Image: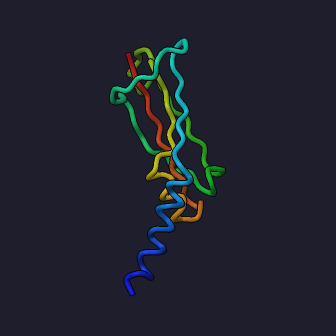
Amino acid sequence: MGNKRVRPLATILLAAAVAGCSTITITRKGEQKLTTPPNFEKSYDYFLWGIVNDHDIDVKDACRGGKVEQMQTQYTFVDALLGICTLGIYSPRTAKVWCQ
């Protein structure tokens, strides 16, 4: 009985691991990627495999008028897991901004 419950969970976790994570990082003048905690981080809701919904991030507001050092968007493991569990109906993405 327990084996019947473990297989679907293992399949979902394996699919999330295979789907992997993706990160797009933009730095000033091609500098090294920052590894410090970001000044701004927020998860945004997307639907239908990311096709529906559009979000704009005001980096000047996120940095309170200061200079932006780095911007990043991530499709994290948790984001992928949520996307898989909802069959792509809900597909969140995480945005991060580093300020000077």
Residue at the far bottom: name it: 1
| Residue closer to the observer: 72 or 55 | 72
Residue 24 in the image: state x and y as whole percent: 55, 33
Residue drawn at the location 53% of the way across and 49% of the way down: 20
Residue at the far top: name it: 29
Is 87 located above or below residue 26 in the figure? below
Displayed quadrant of residue 54: top right
Is 51 located above or below residue 5 in the figure? above
Residue at the far front: name it: 3
Residue at the far right: name it: 51
Residue 62 in the image: state x and y as whole percent: 41, 27
Residue drawn at the location 51% of the way across and 20% of the way down: 27
Residue 10 in the image: state x and y as whole percent: 45, 68
Residue drawn at the location 59% of the way across and 60% of the way down: 88
Residue 47 in the image: state x and y as whole percent: 59, 55
Image quarter where the C terminus lies is top left
Residue drawn at the location 41% of the way across and 81% of the way down: 3
| Residue closer to the observer: 55 or 5 | 5
Number of marks in picture: 0
| Residue closer to the observer: 70 or 12 | 12
The colour mode here is rainbow
Is 67 located above or below residue 53 in the figure? above
Left or right relative to 60: residue 47: right
Image quarter where the N terminus lies is bottom left
